[in-house]
Image: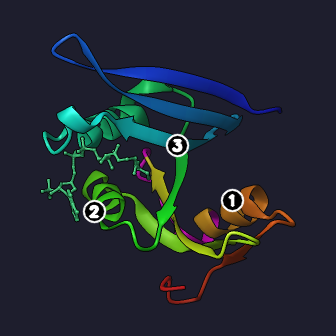
Amino acid sequence: MGTLRKLYDVLYDNENSGVLLIHIIDKSVAKLNALIVYPKFRNKGIATRAMKIAVTNLLPNIVWFFTQCRLNDARALRLEEKVGFQKIGMLKHLGENADNVLFVYNNKHEFSFETAKLLAIKYYSRPDQQLLMGDDNNA
Ligand SMILES: CC(C)(COP(=O)(O)OP(=O)(O)OC[C@H]1O[C@@H](n2cnc3c(N)ncnc32)[C@H](O)[C@@H]1OP(=O)(O)O)[C@@H](O)C(=O)NCCC(=O)NCCS
């Protein structure tokens, strides 16, 4: 299937406090491709709640969610960890000289690194990026 892009407003006390972009890439697989909380709303737990809702309630058919963030982005790394994403590898975007951590979340308690890695290979193998996954999950 082709990619279906969904853009959500993140509301906090009825105010637009950010945006969330999700790409649905297969029947049960999606990528959280961007989450921005506008500066004046930050550090109130909004991103954490928005991501938790996104991976549990928003898309009934989606079981696997992937997301990535820069290796040096402590704030974003902290966020993935708080929501419960698991690190499964590293993505190097060729020509960008940037290292990204690839995370995955399974909302049906069917998590296995084996399956997650197979899905990552399927959905992140592109000529312009290199996917690294070690056996000890610390790639
Ligand atoms: C990343 C972002 C979405 C977080 O939004 P938010 O609503 O402020 O996030 P939350 O309040 O839910 O949680 C932020 C966490 O990061 C922590 N944090 C904030 N600044 C930090 C920093 N400089 N270093 C490390 N951790 C930091 C906060 O303490 C909090 O963790 P805690 O609850 O354990 O204290 C927001 O900063 C943003 O839009 N950044 C720009 C876009 C971006 O980087 N998007 C994510 C790409 S994956």
The residue carrying pointer 1 sits among few (fewer than 14), some (14 to 19) or many (20 or more) residues within 10 Å by Cα, namely some
Label 3 residue near ligand 1, CB within 8 Å: yes
Q: Is residue 108 above or below residue 71?
A: above
Instruction: For residue 110, say whether it is visible.
Output: no
Q: Residue 100, percent across and down?
A: 55, 69
Q: Quadrant of residue 45?
A: top left
Residue picked out by circle 2? 78
Q: Which residues are magenta?
A: 107-115
Disc marking residue 67: none
Q: Secondary structure at mark 2?
A: helix
Q: Secondary structure at mark 1?
A: helix
> Quick check: is 112 in the magenta stretch?
yes
Residue picked out by circle 1? 119
Residue picked out by circle 3? 32
* Quadrant in the picture for the C terminus: bottom right
> Quick check: is 127 in the magenta stretch?
no
* Quadrant in the picture for the N terminus: top right
In percent of the image, x 48 and y 66: which residue is there?
70
Left or right of residue 12: residue 24: right
Which mark lies nearer to you, 1 or 2? 2
Q: Is residue 79 above or below residue 1?
A: below
